[in-house]
Image (cartoon, grey):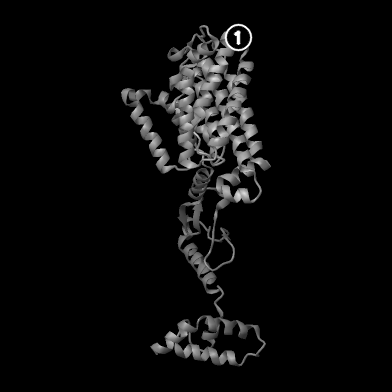
Amino acid sequence: MDIFRSIGITPIVFQFMLVNAILGLSIYLTLSTGMFSLANAGFMGIGAYTGVIMTQNYDQPLWLALIAGMLLAGLIAIPIGLPVLRLRDIYLAIATIGFGEVVRIFILNFDKIAEAFVGERVQLTRGALGISGIPVLTQTWHLLLFLVVVSYVIVRLSRSRFGRSMAAIRQDEQAAANLGINVVLTKNIVFILSAMLAASAGVFNAHLVRTIQPGGYGFNQAVDILAYAVLGGTTTFVGPIVGGLALTALPELMRVAEQFRGVVNGLILMLVIVYLPGGLADPALWRRLLRRNRRASDQPVATDLDGPIYAHANERFAPIRGAGRPHQRQHDCAAGQNHRVDRAKRCGQNHADQQHQRPRPPDERHDSVCGGGYQQSAAASHCAARHRAHLPEHSPVRGDDRARKSAHQPAQARHGDRF
């Protein structure tokens, strides 16, 4: 733990990293269904204020406040998702950004609205000042346990029939509907689950920072949540977790840049997006790196008279040209230092014999019989044709040669024009 402290990763920073990983999973659900929703910041604010009011005003434990925040966010997501989720792409993003702004303004003016209905002074959200003095109830093991459970549920969900429906909607919504998938129901369920996850992260985060304000759950927070998924990648559920951890730890690691820390963080994020479009946790990227590393380890490190020497002892063989299988290093070329010349001669003779004994194509065999050698010419082709004419009609060699002759007829025609 001292190593992490030396680079700025303190226990409180690690807790914020876990909270942001949960936020990354919340937007991963909507993105994996093809919904470009930016409403997670608004649901995070709903969960944060609900949890704080439960623990501070009504003296409820954290787990009960967590359940209350998630349930309220899920209930609010139902009437929001039914009309909004009929939109797609950038239009859906704009609509959900508007929802986040509505939530922020509603929290900002909630006390005044409540006073108009109740007729007496109400202090729950406390307007723009926010709520302060929140007890620190969130522990590291709470976050770790919750993250593990959520990850397990997402994995099981992705491998179920419902998860396959999500993938089908992401690829082609119209085709999924034609296959009998209830697109509206699936998208609304995913939207509700995403809202509940974002609300849970809001409850945990509120009991870490000790003070919350409506401005902390606006458009900037929505962009940060989207950046977690973009940085880590959305191919697997691991991507948003990695993105949330990395993007939270990056400002702490870049403290040496002082006033240029924001510029460096933005530059790093831009480079990752441009050169790693699949994210840091892209499985294809890591498979490509492992394959390249394996190829590098298979390259010979030196050569001698017996052939290339490989870095690994179990790979000390080299394929011989013209042979059907690898030729292992079993030459009798280890006579000693005083017989280097004889050893080179024997090795050269062995390789020459192997090259001489390699099988030749049928055309070359027939041409050598007729005296044509290895060079193709009109006379050699004529001689090969006369030789094949003496073969029986049902001979497989003659049938193969006839097929080969028809396949190479344009080349032979060109030879005829030349001569």
Q: For mark 1, what is the residue?
A: 58
| Total tally of numbered discs in the picture | 1
Q: Is residue 341 above or below residue 357?
A: above
Q: Residue at x 44, y 25 (%)?
A: 218
Left or right of 22? Residue 252 is: left
**What is the quadrant of the C terminus in the image?**
bottom left
Inspect this view and state whether residue 65 appears: yes
176 or 268: nearer the viewer: 176
Q: Is residue 77 above or below residue 404?
A: above
Residue 187 on image: x %, y %: 59, 38
**Residue 159 appears in the rendering:** no
In the image shown, does 207 or 313 lie closer to the viewer?
207
Where residue 386 appears, x then y in whole percent? 55, 92
Name the residue: 61% across, 93% down: 390
Question: Does dot 1 land on a helix, a strand or a loop?
Answer: loop
Query: Going 48% across and 87% down the picture, which residue do you hit?
Result: 372
Residue shown at 60%/9% (left/top)? 58
Mark 1: amino acid: Tyr
Question: Which residue is situated farthest in the left direction here?
Answer: 259
Query: Dot 1 surroundings within 10 Å: few (below 14), some, or many (20 or more)?
Result: few
- In depth, the one of 76 and 282 nearer the eye is 76
- Residue 143 against residue 120 in the figure, above or below: below
Using the rendered view, name the quadrant where residue 90 is placed. Answer: top left
Q: Position of residue 285 (x, y in %)?
A: 50, 44
Residue 214 percent across, percent down from the top left? 46, 19
Query: Is 165 on the left-hand or right-hand side of 352?
Result: right
